[in-house]
Image (cartoon, coloured by chain):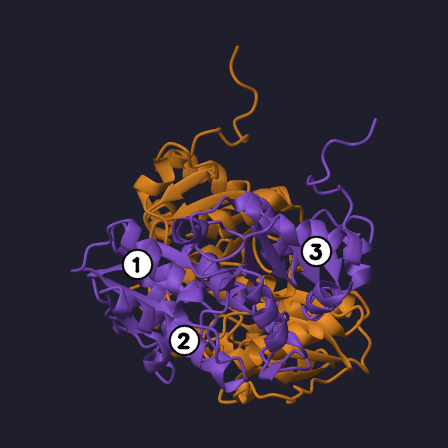
Chain colours: A purple, B orange
Amino acid sequence: MKSSSEDTPPMAPQLLSSRNFKSLFDSVDTFLFDCDGVIWKGEKLIDGVAQTLDLIRSKGKNVVFVTNNSVKSRRQYAEKFRSLGVPSVTQDEIFSSSFAAAMYLKVNNFHKDKKVYVIGGEGILEELQIAGFTGLGGPEDGEKRAQWKSNSLFEHDKSVGAVVVGLDPNINYYKLQYGTLCVRENPGCLFIATNRDAVGHMTDLQEWPGAGCMVAAMCGSTEREPIVVGKPSTFMMDFLLQKFGTETSRMCMVGDRLDTDILFGQNAGCKTLLVLTGVTSESNLLKEGNEIEPDYYTSTVSDMMKLMESP
Amino acid sequence: MKSSSEDTPPMAPQLLSSRNFKSLFDSVDTFLFDCDGVIWKGEKLIDGVAQTLDLIRSKGKNVVFVTNNSVKSRRQYAEKFRSLGVPSVTQDEIFSSSFAAAMYLKVNNFHKDKKVYVIGGEGILEELQIAGFTGLGGPEDGEKRAQWKSNSLFEHDKSVGAVVVGLDPNINYYKLQYGTLCVRENPGCLFIATNRDAVGHMTDLQEWPGAGCMVAAMCGSTEREPIVVGKPSTFMMDFLLQKFGTETSRMCMVGDRLDTDILFGQNAGCKTLLVLTGVTSESNLLKEGNEIEPDYYTSTVSDMMKLMESP
C-alpha cells in the first residue's frame, strides 16, 4: 500500500532536494525566518538572501521575520534590512522579542500607571513606548554604580510592575540590583525574559553570551523563573495567526538553532527547515543524542531559490 | 522507657534555652561561625560578638569562621575583624570561599603553567597567588568593554584552565564573555563557583544580589554547571577536620542562612544553630514548607554568652 500521507513530515530530518522541496513549498503559505545566522551574520547579509525573499514573495507566499534579538525595535530592524540591501522588508513583517515583550504586557492588561524596568537595549524601551508603557533603565543605567556602604539604602521605584530582561552589552551590578529589588520587593512584579539563547553571533566570527546569560543572572538573584516571550515560547504565534488568517500547519519555520527556532516551530505545529549558516552544524544535527530534529535541512536559505528555479 | 539519646538532636528546631544549651555546649569542640549576618552586618559588628567569642575560647573551645563571601582574602578578613574591634581572630581561623577556590585547584593538582580567569574580587586573586597560581581578570577587567563589530575577534588566553566565579560588584559583559569563551573553547577548562548565595547584605539595610547572580549568568551562557567550593558544599570540611583533629559530630555550625549555613552543617554531619540577625526570620524558619531545619535557633550570637553565664 502506498503511504497516504505524502504531506506528513518524516521522522528523521531530510536533506532538502528538488523532489521534497516542491511538496514542502506547495503546502506552505507563510515562511517564518529567523534573522541572525539565517538572513545575516553580524553585519553581513548571507549570499542570495534578497533574491530568495523576492522569489518566495513572487510565488504568492508571505514572509515573516521572527527574531529573538531584542536589542533593536521593529523600526530599527527594518532599517537594518534596508542598510544591508533588502529594502523590501517592512516593520509589519518583523516580530522581534522586544515587540513580544511589549505585546505580552498589552494582552495581559498591564496597568499604564505602572512602570517597566529594562535590562537590555534601546529596542525594548522603544517598543514599550509605542505600546503606551513607561520604561526605565536600559542603556541609561549603563554607567551607574551601586555603592556598598554601611547605612546606604538603594532606592528603587515602587511603581515598577514588570522587569524585562534581554541581551544587554552594558550589563552591570547596578542594573541587576535594580531589577532584583523590583522583582523581590514590589508585590506582584512580573519577571519577563525576551528569550534565553545561551549565545549568539554578535560579530561574524564568534559566539558571545546571549540574553540567556542576563536572564540567568536575574534568576540567580531573584530565585524566580521568568515568563519567556521569544522563541521557543509560542507567545508570538497568536499575532501571526491573526495577521495571516492561516493555520500553523501551513507555516514553515526556517532557522539555524535547534533549541529555539526548530523547537519553536515544532511547539507551534509548523513545518521546520534548518539552515546550516548559523550555530548548528550538520554533525551537531545528526549526532546521537540530539533530540530536536527539523523536518528538513539545507546549507543556506538561497538553496530555496535554486530549487524553485530548477526544472 | 526513658529516651537513651539525650544528645541526639530533636527533629524540630528548638529555641536555645539554658537547659538545652549546656547539653549542646558540652558536646561540641569547635564552633564554626558564618560571618555576614552572624558576626557583622555590612560594616557593623553585631552587639556582644567579641565578648562571646572570648568566652567560648576561654572554655577551651575552637572557633572557626566559614564565610562564603569571596571578595576578601583571609588576610583581608583578619584585617576586617581587627578594624571592627575583634583583633583576636587570626588568618588561620578563617575559611573563606576565596581560599577554598585556591585549595580546590591545589588538591586537584591544577597545573602551575595554566592560568585562572577570575570573575570576582581581589580576595580570589590574592588566595590564588598565595597558593602559587597565576590569576587574571578580576577588578582589572572592571572597566573593559567588548565591541560588537563585524570581523572583530575577541582574543582570550588559551592557557586558562579554570574560571573562578564569585561575587563581583564590577560584573560586566567583557568578563562574562571572557569567562564564557574560556569555559566553552579551552579544552578541559574548569568552571568553579565560590558559592551560589542568591543575595547577601552588602550594606546593613538591604539584600543585594550575591555570587549566585554572577554564577548563574555564567551557567546561562556556558550551559554548564559549576563546581561549588563554598557552603553548602562540604569541600572545606576536610581542611577543618585535619586542622582540629576532631569529628564533625563534635562541631556546631552557627549561621543565619538555611540554604547555605544550616545545610552545610547538616551535609557535613555537624550540629546546627541558626541565629536571627541575618537573612532568616523566625517566621521563615517556622513556616510550612520549609525543609531545612537547624537543631537549635536563637536571636543572636551573644545569647550564647548569656546562657554560659546564667547559673
Quadrant in which the C terminus of chain A appears: bottom right
Q: Disc 2 marks which residue? A: A121
Q: Amino acid at mark 1?
A: Ala
How many angstroms separate mark 1 from mark 3 (CA)? Answer: 45 Å
Q: Amino acid at mark 2?
A: Gly
* Quadrant position of residue A37: bottom right
Q: Residue at x 68, y 54 (%)?
A: B241
Establish whether labels 1 and 3 are both on one chain: no
Q: Residue furthest left?
A: A113
**Where residue B67 sits in the image (x, y, percent)?**
52, 63
Q: Disc 3 marks which residue? A: B238
The residue nearer to you, when weighing B61 against B184, is B184
Q: Amino acid at mark 3?
A: Asp
**Where residue B180 sits in the image (x, y, percent)?**
64, 72
Q: Residue furthest front?
A: A311
Q: Residue at x 30, y 74 (%)?
A: A150
